[in-house]
Image (cartoon, rainbow, N blue to C red):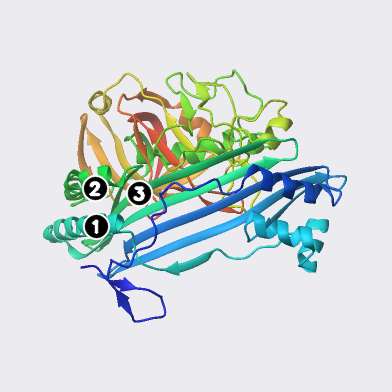
């Protein structure tokens, strides 16, 4: 039986039969159209010419073991609020209110809160922190976590690594949004998914080692049915990460494996194709429509309509219909990602990429599920045709300039390629370069497209942190990337 604390400051523990209501049960729309219209009219009465109302209800349920701990922790993050974008003679302003639309209407309509009314008239922001508390998991999540915990802990420790620690988590995300505008527009969306994450740490010689694996989807029971294979696959790859060798820095031919390494494409290319950043004077892709910006083998897509991914939605956070957008077609720049504001700047229409972290922020152009389309080569062919190089199975954190695409990204799991075969794991490495050179140097694109998402797969842009996204790619080969060793020597 799994037990856990009801409150972080308490030593009381309760069993799993005390359950929260399932956040994935269908509920009514969070802001009815009549209520939205009445709220809009109240804001227009204060002299604003255009009004947009965004309402959000969000719950994130997380059941996990922390680093080095046996006792699982259950956390529930709940949030509700209203974001209001107003425009008029004084320009555009964004307000946010930590309350329901009905409560906000009552405050504004009846003048119950003088300070709040001053904020509405002046356009200043008000807000608070999301309510957060520790509680008891859903029975289905608890059962899934208990099985995952047992399989991963037993399998990882049976490997007998030195100073080993392992962690796991099951996460449930549920969000409902409503958007209404003073021009009569109204839309709503319901987004939900689950993610499964496992991690392991150990010591190899004097070097600390780390690995993690993730999966996700719409149906928790389907994910649970695959736990045995998921854990077994992770343990098999875990066995590869031993007896690593140090290599010399310099320019290397690099094969990036499917799935996780697409983080690099997201960072060094994807941000530069967002409509606001592409308009920056230093932007590398702005205004290059129809021109070559990558190898002819590269077709890059951002598609929020794929079911079950953490970056998916039916309408964006401005209510615009989600669309699959081909950004780069066979190496040529095809389109950018727009919200309504960026679309006006480029004299076009939004293509459903206006996103926000929460009601506290205005929508800006953001990626959703970004991936390189599958090509014609098998992954075995790509490796076999590489006499000497590096194979990257997993990337970690790094540094990126959003507009120019310059990057320095850590290789978490890398291997030497010798005579067309993946051989020994490598020591600490960093990939260094810039987006345009990387895209132009891709000379092989595999047929094994894989999407990657987890609760850690979040995107940071400006002050809007931790927006859920997914990335994906098949195996690709880059003719030349500069490699630095862990000490920064090349």
Q: Nearer the viewer, mark 1 or mark 3?
A: 1
Q: Is residue 111 left or right of residue 360?
A: right
For the point 32% across and 30% down, which residue is it? 475
- The part of the image, by quadrant, that contains residue 123 is bottom right
| Marked residue nearer the N-terminal end (3 or 2) | 3
Q: Earlier in the sequence, mark 1 or mark 3?
A: 1
3D distance between C-alphas at marks 1 and 3: 15 Å
475 shown above or below 361:
above
For label 2, the SS is helix
* Residue on which disc 1 sits: 143
Q: Quadrant of residue 64?
A: bottom left
Residue at 67 percent across and 41 percent down: it is 180
Q: What residue is shown with label 3?
A: 195
For the N terminus, the quadrant is: bottom left
Foreground pick, 208 / 189:
189
Q: Which disc number belongs to residue 224?
A: 2
The answer to whether mark 2 and mark 1 are in CB contact below 8 A is yes
Question: Helix, strand or loop at disc 3?
Answer: strand
Q: Looking at the picture, how far across and down is residue 279, in whole percent?
A: 68, 34
């Amino acid at each position: 039986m799994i037990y856990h604390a009801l409150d972080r400051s308490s030593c009381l523990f309760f069993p799993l039969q005390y359950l929260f209501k399932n956040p994935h049960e269908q509920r009514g729309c969070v802001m009815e159209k009549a209520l939205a219209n009445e709220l809009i009219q109240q804001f227009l009465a204060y002299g604003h010419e255009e009004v947009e109302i965004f309402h959000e209800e969000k719950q994130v349920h997380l059941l996990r073991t922390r680093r080095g701990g046996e006792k699982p922790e259950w956390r529930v993050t709940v949030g509700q609020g209203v974001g209001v974008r107003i425009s008029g003679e004084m320009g555009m302003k964004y307000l946010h209110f930590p309350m329901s639309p009905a409560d906000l209407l009552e405050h504004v309509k009846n003048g119950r809160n003088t300070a709040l009314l001053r904020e509405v008239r002046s356009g200043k922001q008000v807000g608070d922190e999301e309510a957060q508390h520790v509680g008891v998991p859903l029975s289905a999540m608890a059962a899934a976590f208990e099985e995952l915990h047992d399989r991963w802990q037993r399998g990882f420790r049976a490997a007998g690594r030195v100073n080993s620690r392992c962690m796991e988590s099951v996460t449930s995300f549920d969000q409902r949004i409503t958007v209404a505008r003073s021009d009569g527009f109204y839309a709503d969306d319901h987004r939900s998914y689950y993610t499964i994450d496992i991690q392991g740490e150990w010591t190899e010689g004097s070097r600390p080692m780390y690995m993690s694996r993730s999966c996700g989807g719409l149906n928790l029971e389907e994910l649970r049915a695959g736990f045995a294979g998921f854990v077994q696959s992770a343990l098999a790859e875990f066995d590869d990460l031993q007896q690593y060798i140090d290599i010399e820095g310099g320019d290397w031919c690099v094969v990036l494996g499917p799935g996780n390494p697409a983080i690099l494409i997201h960072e060094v290319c994807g941000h530069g194709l967002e409509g606001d950043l592409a308009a920056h004077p230093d932007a590398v892709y702005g205004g290059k429509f129809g021109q070559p910006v990558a190898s002819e083998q590269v077709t890059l897509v951002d598609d929020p309509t794929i079911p079950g991914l953490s970056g998916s939605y039916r309408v964006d956070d401005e209510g615009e219909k989600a669309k699959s957008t081909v950004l780069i077609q066979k190496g040529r720049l095809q389109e950018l990602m727009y919200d309504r504001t960026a679309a006006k700047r480029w004299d076009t229409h939004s293509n459903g990429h206006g996103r926000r972290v929460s009601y506290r922020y205005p929508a800006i152009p953001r990626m959703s599920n970004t991936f390189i389309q599958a090509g014609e080569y098998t992954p075995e062919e790509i490796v076999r045709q590489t006499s000497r190089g590096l194979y990257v199975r997993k990337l970690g954190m790094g540094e990126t300039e959003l507009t120019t695409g310059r990057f320095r990204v850590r290789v978490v799991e890398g291997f030497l390629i010798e005579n067309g075969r993946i051989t020994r794991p490598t020591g600490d490495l960093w990939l260094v370069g810039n987006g345009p050179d990387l895209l132009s140097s891709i000379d092989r694109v595999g047929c094994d497209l894989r999407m990657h998402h987890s609760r850690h797969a979040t995107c940071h842009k400006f002050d809007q942190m931790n927006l859920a996204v997914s990335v994906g790619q098949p195996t690709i080969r880059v003719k030349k990337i500069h490699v630095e060793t862990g000490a920064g020597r090349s």
